[in-house]
Amino acid sequence: MLELRGVSRSFDGKPAVAGLDLDIPAGRTTALLGPSGCGKSTVLRLLIGLLEPDSGQVRFDGAAVRAGDAPEQIAQRRRMGYVIQDGGLFPHLDARGNMALLARHLGWEAARVEERVAALCELTHFPVDGLERFPGQLSGGQRQRVSLMRALMLDPDVLLLDEPLGALDPMIRSELQEDLRRVFAALGKTVVLVTHDIGEAGYLAEEIVLMRAGQIVQRGSLEALVRRPEAPFVSEFVKAQRSPLESLAAGEGEA
Ligand code: ADP
Ligand code: MG
């Protein structure tokens, strides 16, 4: 569905993505996992054509992805829903206005817009009475739901999510993780999810791509990463995300 072939991209002479080969299969959820600054967001921006690679190729459904505003590039980008890091909602538009912006721009009739908005509220468990609220009047979890609904408005083939749960407290985060898992399963779309949380990657994605310094270190299931690490970095990354049970066991060991 999505392909990167030998893709490199630098900023100010520093490589953010270095010679990346990556295939994203259709109809499944793939997580891009790795520490801050390893190039995850850059990969998403390359996939959707907001950034051009310095070298290499990006393809979507067999067609080259290019940055730019030619009609075919715009059409291609509209087949991908994108939730940017921190949501990116327009603060001066209410939830409905944020969701409906592009559909209205494309000339959808009001009834069709309303029907789609209502269906998405149901899908994402967003309260309909929140549609008139502005982003600043919504909770963090509700804002993330609006960002997700906005990305889904045009029923894209691909959904790209950049740390959609990054700034939420643990209870809200876990609730939204459950909702996302349910939504991904219900929609059956191709999803690429960026996260730095290995538990979240394992919970939401069938396949994990662990990155470091613009390159892929290991790709596979959560189980493969935990039980069959292919590089010392993989075990270090797994170990760095300590679970509550592990902390408890360590405390009991000292007692
Ligand atoms: P991640 O999402 O994994 O945290 P990014 O893809 O955002 O990482 O960034 C990878 C590297 O590229 C970082 O060193 C970051 O500072 C740099 N970078 C990303 N985007 C830009 C940009 N627009 N201008 C300059 N440097 C950038
Ligand atoms: Mg990022």
Image: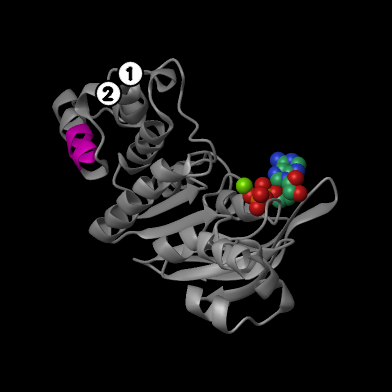
154 or 107, which lies in front? 154
Figure check: 86 above or below 251: above
Q: Amino acid at mark 1?
A: Arg
Residue drawn where x is 20% and y is 27% of the image: 128
Residue 231 in percent (x, y) is at 70, 79
Residue at mark 2: 130
Q: Amino acid at mark 2?
A: Gly
The segment highlighted magenta reads 116-122
Magenta stretch encompasses residue 142: no
Residue 91 in view of the camera = yes
Residue 96 in percent (x, y) is at 29, 24
Left or right side of 125 for 16 = right
Residue 143 in percent (x, y) is at 40, 31
Q: What distance separates the C-alpha of mark 1 from that of mark 2? A: 5 Å
Figure check: 104 above or below 187: above
Residue at mark 1: 133
